[in-house]
Image (spheres, rainbow, N blue to C red):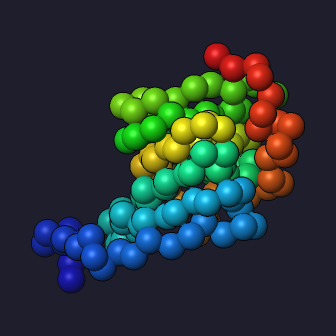
Amino acid sequence: MNHATGIEISRDDERPVRQGPAETFTGQVSLKPLFDPNDVRNTSAAQVSFTPCARTAWHTHPAGQTLFVTSGTGWVQEWGGTKQRINPGDVIWTPPGVKHWHGATDTTAMTHIAIQAFVDGRPVDWMEHVTDDQYLDQRTQ
């Protein structure tokens, strides 16, 4: 199909949910792909759901990332910064190369849509896990 001239519908039941891999997530995380790059779009998106205490590992995005919180309450933190609470309707922009993590709070689940562009064939560079001490640090905004 020529994506530039025809409408493409990605049916919900054709995009199965998978568990977030233990190499890049802590706790129970489910990933639902929404769309991938194609011949005219270099972005991808996924719906990511975190149970309480679940979170990403530290990571960066070569072209940045936009998150849109759809339910629950979560936290996002930039390396060296303070944890910030995120709520439904919040849109979070993380610039290219900024080391960060995001996930649910310790008492509430959270779901967000994550949108990121690909650079040199990759949308993310994963790093070390967020430790429990880093995650539970009480300093928040």
The foreground one among 17 and 128 is 17
Q: Is residue 59 left or right of residue 137?
A: left
Tell me if residue 62 comes above or below residue 84 in the rendering. below
Q: Is residue 96 visible?
A: no
Residue at (83, 54) in percent of width and height: 128
Residue 101, position in %: x, y?
Answer: 68, 43
Q: Is residue 122 visible?
A: yes
Residue extending furthest left? 6
- Image: 130 above or below 27: above
Q: Residue 84, image x and y in percent?
A: 62, 25
Residue drawn at 77 percent across, 23 percent down: 138
The N terminus lies in quadrant? bottom left
Q: Is residue 80 left or right of residue 78?
A: right
Between 60 and 84, the residue placed more toward the observer is 84
**To which quarter of the image does residue 77 belong?**
top right
Looking at the picture, how far across and down is residue 50, in whole percent?
A: 55, 51
Depth check: 123 or 86 in front?
A: 86
Count up the numbered dots. 0
Q: Is residue 26 above or below residue 16?
A: above
Is the residue 138 above or below the residue 102 in the image? above
Q: Image quadrant for the C terminus? A: top right
Residue at (69, 20) in percent of width and height:
140
Residue extending farthest front: 107
Which residue is outermost to the top?
141
Horizontal and vertical percent for residue 62? Answer: 63, 51
